Image (cartoon, coloured by chain):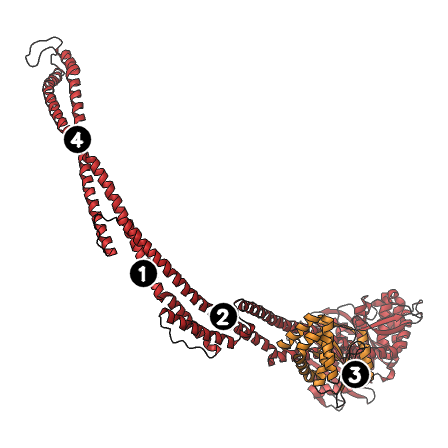
Amino acid sequence: MIELKTLRIKGFRAYTEEKEFIFDNHVVLLFGENHRGKSSTLNAIEWCLFGNECIGKDTGIRERIEWEIPNRNMRPYEALVEVNLKDKTTEGKITVARKWVSARKDELSVTLPDGKSLRGNEAKEKLTQVLGLSFRDFLTTVYQHQEAIRDVLVQEPKERNEAIDRLLGLSNYRNIIRGIESAKLGIKQRKMVDEFDNFVSSIDTILRSRENDLRDKRKKAVEKGLKETQLDEKGALEIAGKVKGQLHKFSSEVGLTLADLQVPAQRIDLHEFQKTTGGEIKRFRSEMPDVRKQQDLFEERTKTTALKEQYEQKESDWKTAKNKFEAMKKETSKLKVEVEEIENKISEKEKELRTADAKGAVITEAIDYLRLEGVDKNICPVCETEKPGLFEHLEKEWTEKYEKALGVIESQLDTFKKRKDEINIWFGEYKRAKRDYEDAYKGIEQIKKRIGGALGQGISIEDDLGVILSNELKEVNKRLEELGKAVKYKQATLDQIVSELEKINLIMDILDLEEKKRIVEQIQQSSEYQQMEDLKDEMAILVDDIEKIKEAIREASYKESEQKVTAAGNVIDNYFHRIANNPSIRKIEFSVKVDSRTGFNSYMFKDQGGKDLTPILSQGDLNAMALSIFLGMGCSRGTNQTFGFVMLDDPSQSLGSEHKENLIRILNEVSCERMVILSSMDKELQNLSLSKMTRAKTKYVFYDWTTKQGPEVKKE
Amino acid sequence: MKTEIYERLKNLHDKYGPQEFGKLCQKLLAIGFRMAGYSHIVERGVQGVDVDAAGENGEKYSIEVKTTVGQSLNFEQKDVDGLQKRKEDGYETVLAVLRLDRFSNWIFAKADTIKSRRLLIDSLRPHRLGDLEERICPCIDEAINEHFDETMLGGQKYLDHVLKQKGITVRES
C-alpha cells in the first residue's frame, strides 16, 4: 500500500511560490473559502502521479479540457510538483517529481528507496509499477472530484448516466464510441455512394441521350428507305459504290468528265468520298451544257427585253416631239404678222411720247422755277410778262393734260412690248421643239441600227420593230422553257444522288453514335469502375466492422458496469442508507441496463419495492448516491487497495446537516484503514470533521490568495 | 452489367412484368449454376427457398432470389425462416439480388446474418460472396444470351423445359 507523506508545489495552477504539505496524520483537512487553492492542492498530487493523463476530454471531466498547468502569473512559466510516497510493505521512500515543460510535455523523475533516480520512460514505467493503479481507477477509488458529484446532481438522465459511468471508471468506453461516431463513417460512406451514384447517373443520362439520338437517326434512315440491315459500315460502303455508278452515268449523259472517284474500302475513307462527290455534284449542277445554254438564253432575253424597252421609249419620245413641233409650226405665220403690227404700233407710240414729253418738260421746268423762293408766281419765266394765276394754271395743265396722257402712252407701249417678248419666247420654244423632233428622229434611227445589229438583220425604216422584238422574245422564252424541263430533270437526277449521299451521312452518324455509346458503356467494364465498386464494398465492410466494434465496446462497457454494480452494489446501498438515512428508502437496488436508443449504459435506482427512485431522489440524496458510489468503489476492494489514502474535494455540495454528520462518521471509519484527505469550504462539515473524527488530524487552513504569492496556507 | 444483357433483361421485364420477371431470373440463375458445374440443383417455383445448388466438392448453397428495379427490396420473415431451415440442413444460405439497372450486377450475399426488413441493396455489400459472384454471374449472362429469344416467346414454360433438359429438378408446388 502506498502512503502519501509530503507534497511540494511550485507554480502549479493556483500556486506561485513554493509550498510544502506534510501528511503526517490519518486525517488531513484542507479548509478554506472558495478560490483559495484547495482543489489545486489535490490536483497537484494527481498531476504529479499521472501527468498529462489527467488533462483533456478523455478524463471525462469537463473542466480538464484546455486545463492550464502553470500559474498564469509566473514569469517565466514553470510548474513543479514533488510527492513523497512510502511503500508500507517495504517501508521504502519513493520521491516522484514532475516538472512542466510545455502544454504537451513534462519531465518526470522517480527516486527509489536506494537513492537511484530514474527519468523519462524508465521513470514512467517504474511509477506505473509502484502505483499499480490506472488513472481511471484512481479517479474512481482514490480521488472524488467535485465534478463527479455535480454531474450526478444533474437531473438530465443522459448526463447522470455519463457521470455514474465516470464514477465507475467506464468513461473510456464512451470516449471511444464517441470518437468512432465523430468520425461519421456512415455519413462519409453515404456521401461516397451518392457521389458514385451521381457519376453513374450522369453516365446513364448520356447513354439515354445517345440512345434517343440513335433511335431518331434510325427512324430517319428507315424513312429515307434504308433497311435495318444496311445500317452498318458495309451498307454505307455499298451506297458509296452505287453513288459512283450513278455519277458516272450522269456525267456520260451530259457530256462532262467525272473526277477520279475512288469507292472507299473502309468507313474511314467515306468522309473524303462524300466531300469529293459533293464537289462534283456542285460542279455538274453549274457546268451542265443545258445549264450553260440556259444561262446564255437568259442573257439574250434580258438584252432583247432591254432593247425592246429602249425602242419603245425612243418611239414614244419621237412621236411626242413630232406632235408638238407640228402643232407649233401651224402658228408661226400668224405670229410673224402680229409681231410686225406690234413693232409698228410701238414705233408710233414712242413718237407720240417723245412729242408730249418735250412740251411737258417745258411745263415741269416752269413749275419747278416758279416754286423757287422769291420768284413771282404770276410772271412768265420765258416772256417775263405778268400772267396772274400762271403757277396754278401751269400745275393744272400738267396734272390734267400731260401727266395723264403720258401715262396712257407708256402703258400702251408696255403692253405692246410684253406681247412682243411673249411671241419671241414662243419662237424660242418653237426652235427647241424643232430640234427635239429632229433629235428624236435621229434616236429612232440609232436604236434601229442597234437592234438590227443585235438581231443580225438589216432593219429598214418600214419595219415594225415592236413586233419583231416581241416575236424574238417569244422564241427565246420557248427555248428557255424547253431547256428548263431538261435541266430540271437532270437536277432531279443529281438530287437523287445527293439523297443517296445523305443516306451515307445518316449511317455514319448512326455508326458514330454507336461508337460513342460503346465508349460510355465501356466505362462500366473499366478497371477504374471496378475499383470504385470494390471501394464501395470495402467501405461498406469497414462501416459494418466499425459498427460491430462499437457494439462490442458497448457490450464490454455494459458487462464491466454490471460487474462493478453487482460487486459494489451492497456496499453502495449500505453507504447510501447510512448517509441519506431516507426513511422511505429501506434498500436501494442499483442496476444497469443498455439504453436501447443511445446504446450506452443506463443506471437505475429502485427501492425495496422495485419502484424507480429517480423521480423522488432529492439533490441531497443524489449527492449521497454519488458519494456512496465513490466510497463503494473504493471500499469494495478492501485491503487490496494499493493507495493508502482517499481524497475528497468538496463532498457536501447538497448535503443536509444530518447527511454531513453521517458522511463524517463513515469517513472516520475509512480513516482507520486509509488516510482521508478532505477538502471543504463548508464550515459545518469542517466543524463536524474536527469534532467527530476520532483519529489525529492535520489541518491546513487556506486563508487568502494573491496573484503574486498564491495561497496563504497555515498548518494548524 | 453489360448493356446487351441489360437490354435483354429489360425486354423480358417489360414483356412479363416484375413478378414473372423474378421467376424467369430465378430459373436463369439455376441454369447459370448448372453451367458453372454444379451437379445437384433444385429450382422451386412456388414454396420454399428458390434454388438449391450443390457442387461435387461439397459446396451447398441455398439461394433466395430477389429482383427489383429500385434500390431496396423486402426481405421477409418467411425468407429468413426458409433459409434458416436450409442452413440447418447444411446449406450455406445466400440472398441473390438483381437490380434491373444498367449499372448494377447480381449481388450474392451471405444470408445467415441478414434480418428480415426492407433492405437497401447497398447494405448487402459487407456480406457479399465475391468468389461465388465471379463464378456464377458470367454463366447467368451466358444463359440469358443463349435463351433470350425463346424466353421472350415461351416465358417460364420454355425455361422449365430447359431446366429439365439440363437435369435440374423443378419443383412447382
Task: Count neighbours of disc 2 (C-alpha within 10 A) and say few if under 14, some if 14 to 19, many if 20 or more.
Answer: many
Identity, as a three-letter code, of the amino acid under mark 4: Leu
Quadrant containing the N terminus of chain A in the rendered view: bottom right
Vertical comparison of A139 with A158: above or below: below
Q: Point out residue B29 in the picture as x, y percentages from the top left corner.
A: 72, 80
User: Label 4 to label 2, Cα distance in Å?
Assistant: 88 Å
Q: Which residue is mark 4?
A: A335
Q: Position of residue B51 (x, y in %)?
A: 76, 81
**A452 or A540: which is nearer to us?**
A452
Query: Where does the image place residue B77, in percent across and percent down from the top left?
Result: 81, 74
* Tag in front: 2 or 1: 1
Chain letter corresponding to the colour orange = B
What residue is rendered at 94% in x and 69% in y? A609
Q: Nearer the viewer, residue A162 or A93?
A: A162
Image position of A328 (left or right of A154): left
Give the residue pinned by disc 3: A133
Q: Secondary structure at mark 3?
A: loop
Query: Of discs 1 and 3, which sits in the foreground?
Result: 1
Kind of element beneath mark 2: helix
Looking at this view, is A128 or A17 the one in front?
A: A128
Disc nearer the start of the sequence (2/1): 1
Mark 2 — residue?
A: A503
Q: Secondary structure at mark 1?
A: helix
Q: Is residue B140 above or below residue A294?
A: below
Question: How far apart are labels 1 and 4 at the CA level?
Answer: 58 Å
- Which chain letter matches label 1? A
Name the chain under label 2: A
Q: Which chain is red?
A: A
